[in-house]
Image (cartoon, rainbow, N blue to C red):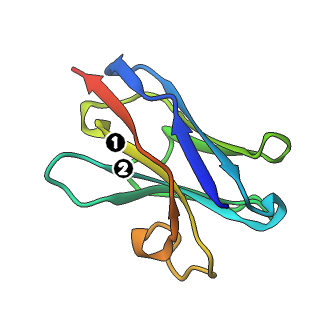
Amino acid sequence: EVQLQASGGGLVQAGGSLRLSCTASGFIFDDIAIGWFRQAPGKEREGVSCIYSLDGRTHYADSVKGRFTVIMDNAENTVYLQMNNLKPEDTAVYYCAAPVRPMADPLSPSAYDYWGQGTQVTVSS
């Protein structure tokens, strides 16, 4: 059974940092992609980042480039999202997800099939 578990959210002041974790099970971790998404109240879910295990390729939304880093620990079957210089507009519920098929757009929520539960990130000004 495929399962994804996201954790690490919390309350932080603007300019601070958080590290989210996504632990995956039921996958062949040597050849998967894991995406991070977020959804703020009243807004659509948006792609934040994606990483491919096979070659380490990463993708980032323009809004987080230079501030967020996605890291994959194959030994622990865990993907981390290191978030630095957080801004109030980063406040959202963050989700990790995995696709079944190759993706044309790795930051599109519709490309993903398996989702973990969300973790709340709140950035105060």
Q: Residues within 10 Å of mark 1 (few under 14, many from 20)?
A: some
Image side of residue 8 versus residue 102, left or right: left
Where's residue 25, x and y in %? Answer: 71, 52
Where's residue 54, x and y in %? Answer: 81, 65
Q: Which mark is residue 15?
A: none
Amino acid tagged 2: Arg
Residue furthest out toward the front = 1
What residue is disc 1 on?
A: 93
Q: Determine which quarter of the picture holds residue 69.
A: top right
In what element is the residue under mark 2?
strand
Write the residue at 29% across / 26% down.
123
Q: Is label 1 in contact with label 2 (beta carbons under 8 Å)?
A: yes
Q: Quadrant of the C terminus?
A: top left
Q: Residues within 10 Å of mark 2 (few under 14, many from 20)?
A: many
Give 61 or 47, whichever is nearer the viewer: 47
Q: Determine which quarter of the picture holds residue 103.
A: bottom right
In what element is the residue under mark 1?
strand
Q: Could you tell which of marks 1 and 2 lies nearer the N-terminus?
A: 2
Give 66 or 93, whichever is nearer the viewer: 93
Residue 103, above or below 123: below
What residue is disc 2 on?
A: 38
| Whether residue 55 can be seen here | no
Amino acid tagged 1: Val
Q: Quadrant of the N terminus?
A: bottom right
Where's residue 98, x and y in %? Answer: 58, 63
| Whether residue 25 can be seen here | yes
Write the residue at 53% across / 58% down.
97
Q: Determine which quarter of the picture holds residue 23.
A: top right
Residue 32, above or below 93: below
Measured in 3D between alpha carbons, the distance from the residue under mark 1 to the one under mark 2, in whole angstroms, is 5 Å
